Image (cartoon, rainbow, N blue to C red):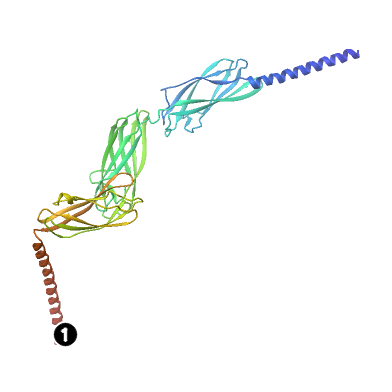
């Protein structure tokens, strides 16, 4: 009897050890060969992701295991780029449920693409959580999705300038803006530009307002818009930040794009005119002195500055090349101008140079009246007559004052 019980005990222990070993083996097999999910295929409605728009993905998820089924499977979609998000009204987790070994199922996922995505591809991380037997496991795979970067209509300011170079108190100016539809695939419809942050000192010119209809812009089209501005006499020399709001319609509906530009004033002009002086009298076909003092307000030297002179002057006098304008320094130059017509003449002087952005700047320095004599003798005669005239006026004034003084003294004595 004791032997029987002993043998039964040995058999029971053996079976128990065999069961434990089998269970451990099953865990080991699952750990190395559990249900494993992956993407069998992926298609995008419209073929590519479009920045700023929602996209619909058709993902075919497959259980690649030949041994284990997947239970309560979940799919989580994320992106290392930080540019893909769940579409409005949805999240980034999709329930798959049961998926047998070797089986596939389709998941329709809706995602939103950030408008500032500017790469040609973007990653989509697919993380799967599955249950097999009593265990839970997860694995991931990464998809690389194509992006039509810039395909959405996008209005940008390519460059801008003032016809006066800078804002000048009391002087109207025209703001020229070169705008560009950056999209290579989409047109922009009904483009309207609205300017904001205009002050009481800088405002739309008479007969205009702060809205400017531009209309239709083709893909990759560049256009120049001219905006007349009035500058008050009370304008204080300072830079003016201008808010440019573009409203238009793209393929996906209404779009707003807000950009900021800074209109320069005389305070920030690269070259500031400190003084300009020209003689009021000149001799025909002889050199006349023009003195100019400039200040280079920029951080680099300017080497291509020149004076442009319009009026009855010789060809050699129409363009005067200046020396190097050194950074943060005064520049003084005495130039020579030759008049080729007699009488009272007017000349206009402009300063032209290239700024640090490579833009050609031109500033009008003013219009000056000059009396041109035929000869040096006539010049001296006119000059002497002017001097004698001033002396005569001085003597006459002195005589009047002296007479008044004597009359007042005599009146006091009589009283």
Read off the residue under disc 1.
Answer: 412
> Residue 249 at what x, y percent from top left?
34, 31
Could you tell me if residue 150 is visible in this image? yes
Q: In what element is the residue under mark 1?
A: helix
Q: Quadrant of residue 66?
A: top right
Q: In the depicted view, which residue is nearer to us: 274 or 56?
A: 274
Determine whether, in the image, residue 36 is placed left or right of residue 264. Answer: right
Q: In the depicted view, which residue is nearer to us: 275 or 394?
A: 275
> Could you tell me which residue is drawn at 29 percent across and 41 percent down?
177
Determine whether, in the image, residue 95 is placed left or right of residue 226. Answer: right
Q: In the depicted view, which residue is nearer to us: 12 or 92?
A: 12
Q: Is residue 404 above or below residue 319?
A: below
- Quarter of the image that includes the N terminus: top right
Determine whether, in the image, residue 105 is placed left or right of residue 21. Answer: left
Q: Is residue 407 above or below residue 208?
A: below
> Residue 90 at what x, y percent from top left?
49, 28
């Amino acid at each position: 009897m004791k032997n029987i019980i002993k043998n039964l005990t040995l058999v029971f222990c053996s079976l128990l050890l065999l069961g434990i070993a089998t269970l451990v083996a099953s865990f080991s097999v699952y750990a190395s060969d559990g249900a494993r999910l992956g993407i069998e295929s992926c298609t995008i409605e419209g073929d590519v992701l479009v920045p700023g728009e929602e996209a619909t993905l058709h993902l075919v998820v497959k259980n690649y295991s030949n041994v284990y089924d997947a239970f309560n499977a979940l799919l989580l979609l994320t992106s290392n780029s930080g540019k893909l998000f769940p579409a409005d009204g949805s999240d980034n987790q999709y329930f798959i449920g049961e998926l047998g070994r070797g089986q596939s199922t389709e998941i329709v996922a809706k995602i939103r693409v950030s408008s500032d995505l500017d790469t040609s591809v973007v990653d989509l991380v697919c993380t799967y959580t599955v249950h097999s037997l009593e265990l839970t496991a997860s694995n991931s795979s990464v998809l690389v999705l194509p992006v039509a970067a810039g395909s959405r209509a996008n209005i940008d300011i390519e460059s801008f300038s003032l016809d006066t170079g800078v804002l000048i108190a009391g002087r109207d100016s025209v703001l020229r803006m070169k705008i560009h539809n950056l999209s290579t695939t989409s047109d922009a419809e009904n483009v309207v530009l609205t300017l904001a942050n205009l002050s009481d000192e800088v405002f739309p010119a008479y007969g205009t307002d702060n809205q400017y209809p531009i209309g239709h812009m083709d893909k990759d089209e560049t256009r120049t818009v001219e905006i007349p501005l009035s500058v008050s006499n009370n304008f204080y020399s300072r830079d003016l930040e201008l808010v440019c709001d573009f409203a238009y319609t793209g393929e996906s509906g209404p779009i707003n794009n807000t950009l900021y530009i800074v209109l320069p004033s005389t305070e920030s002009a690269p070259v500031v005119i400190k003084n300009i002086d020209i003689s009021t009298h000149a001799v025909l076909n002889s050199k006349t002195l023009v003195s100019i003092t400039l200040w280079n307000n920029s951080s680099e030297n300017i080497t291509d500055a020149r004076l442009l002179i319009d009026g009855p002057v010789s060809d050699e006098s129409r363009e005067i090349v200046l020396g190097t304008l050194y950074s943060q320094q005064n520049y003084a130059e005495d130039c020579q101008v030759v008049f080729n017509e007699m009488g009272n003449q007017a000349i206009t002087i402009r300063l032209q140079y290239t700024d640090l952005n490579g833009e050609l700047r031109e500033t009008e320095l003013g219009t000056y009246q000059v009396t041109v004599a035929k000869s040096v003798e006539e010049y001296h005669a006119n000059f002497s007559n002017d001097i004698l005239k001033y002396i005569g006026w001085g003597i006459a004034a002195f005589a009047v004052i002296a007479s008044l003084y004597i009359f007042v003294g005599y009146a006091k004595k009589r009283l």
